[in-house]
Amino acid sequence: MVILVVALLLLGVALGPVAHVPLPVTLVAAAAICGWLLVFAARERYGRQSTRRS
């Protein structure tokens, strides 16, 4: 139960600034984060495939 409370508190702290930022800025930041995560996932996936083959 304490973990749930802490998780909700951290979520509120993380999302709090988003409520005060204009929508276009939020969308640009979200797109940048999404792009970074896609690049990271692709590097992890292809990096693990190349290590399995050798």
Image (tube, helix red, strand yellow):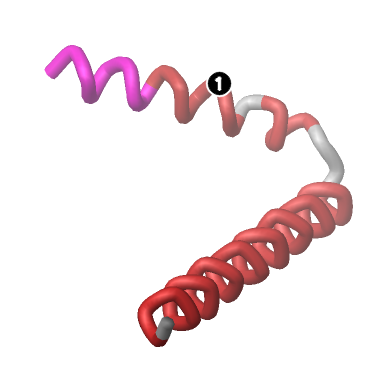
Q: Report the residue marked by disc 1.
A: 13
Identified at 53% across, 79% down, the residue is 46
Which quadrant holds residue 31? bottom right
Q: Is residue 49 above or below residue 8?
A: below
Q: In the picture provided, is 35 more to the left or to the right than 53?
A: right
Identified at 50% across, 25% down, the residue is 12
Q: Number of numbered discs present?
A: 1
In the picture as drawn, the residue positioned furthest to the top comes out as: 2
In the picture as drawn, the residue positioned furthest to the left comes out as: 1
Q: Is residue 21 above or below residue 36?
A: above
Q: In the rendering, at what x and y percent does residue 21 appear? A: 82, 36
The amino acid marked with disc number 1 is Val
Question: What main secondary structure does the magenta stretch of the protein show?
Answer: helix
Q: In the rendering, at what x and y percent does residue 42 appear? A: 58, 75
Q: In the picture provided, is 50 more to the left or to the right than 34?
A: left
Q: In the rendering, at what x and y percent does residue 16 appear? A: 62, 26
Is residue 33 magenta-colored?
Answer: no
Q: What crowding class fits label 1: few (fewer than 14 Cα within 10 Å), some (14-19), or many (20 or more)?
A: few
Q: Which residues are magenta?
A: 1-8
Q: Which quadrant of the figure contains the N terminus?
A: top left
Is residue 2 magenta-colored?
Answer: yes
Which quadrant holds residue 54? bottom left
Q: In the picture provided, is 14 more to the left or to the right than 17?
A: left
Which quadrant holds residue 49? bottom left
Identified at 62% across, 70% down, the residue is 38
Identified at 44% across, 72% down, the residue is 48
Q: In the rendering, at what x and y percent does residue 47 appear? A: 53, 72
In the structure shown, which secondary structural element does the residue marked by tag 1 occupy? helix
Between 16 and 54, the residue placed more toward the observer is: 54
